[in-house]
Image (cartoon, grey):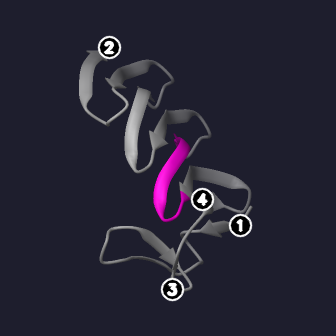
């Protein structure tokens, strides 16, 4: 599987809003690193569209958010956390990316 780092690899967004790499719709893993080996974000793409798991981390390594995309749209539950690790919210999407419900914590 091909992997690109947003900090060092030149990906672009095409006219059809797909992620392109070397002039082609990208399929693979896209990461953003704070330092070598320390991920800030990780997302998977198929034919230039977000497809699969997506995760973000706070700079201290705690999980910031995690969810799923299907053909460019969010699906299922997106969970987010505060910097101290407490749950912030959970957002539920249907299979077409429409928001169904949101639950927030203080």
Q: Which mark is residue 105?
A: 2
Q: Residue at x 61, y 68 (%)?
A: 5
Q: Residues within 10 Å of mark 1 (few under 14, many from 20)?
A: few
Q: Position of residue 26 (x, y in %)?
A: 55, 69
Q: Which residues are magenta?
A: 46-58
User: What residue did someone put label 1 on?
Assistant: 2
First in sequence: mark 1 vs mark 3: 1
30 over 24 or under it: above or below? above
Residue underneath mark 4: 31
Q: Secondary structure at mark 4?
A: strand
Residue 87 is inside the magenta segment: no
Q: Position of residue 99 (x, y in %)?
A: 25, 28
**Quarter of the image where one finds residue 52:** top right
> Residue at (46%, 42%) from the top-left corner?
70
Dots 4, 2 in contact, CB < 8 A: no
Q: Which mark is residue 23?
A: 3
Magenta-colored segment: predominant secondary structure: strand
Q: Position of residue 73 (x, y in %)?
A: 37, 44
| Distance CA(mark 4)–CA(mark 2) | 28 Å
Mark 3 vs mark 2, CA separation in Å: 43 Å
Tell how many labels.
Answer: 4
As measured in the structure, the alpha-carbon distance from the residue carrying label 2 to the one carrying label 1 is 37 Å
Circle 1: element type? loop
Q: Nearer the viewer, residue 4 or 83?
A: 4
Rendered position, 23 above or below 31? below
Quick one: quadrant of the N terminus? bottom right
């Amino acid at each position: 599987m091909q992997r690109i780092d947003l900090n060092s690899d030149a990906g672009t967004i095409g006219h059809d809003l797909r992620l392109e790499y070397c002039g082609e719709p990208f399929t693979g893993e896209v990461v953003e690193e704070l330092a070598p080996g320390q991920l800030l974000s990780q997302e998977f793409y198929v034919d230039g569209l977000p497809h699969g798991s997506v995760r973000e981390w706070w700079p201290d390594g705690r999980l910031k958010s995690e969810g799923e995309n299907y053909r460019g749209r969010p699906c299922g539950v997106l969970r987010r956390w505060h910097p101290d690790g407490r749950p912030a919210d959970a957002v539920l999407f249907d299979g077409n990316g429409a928001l169904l419900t949101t639950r927030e914590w203080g």
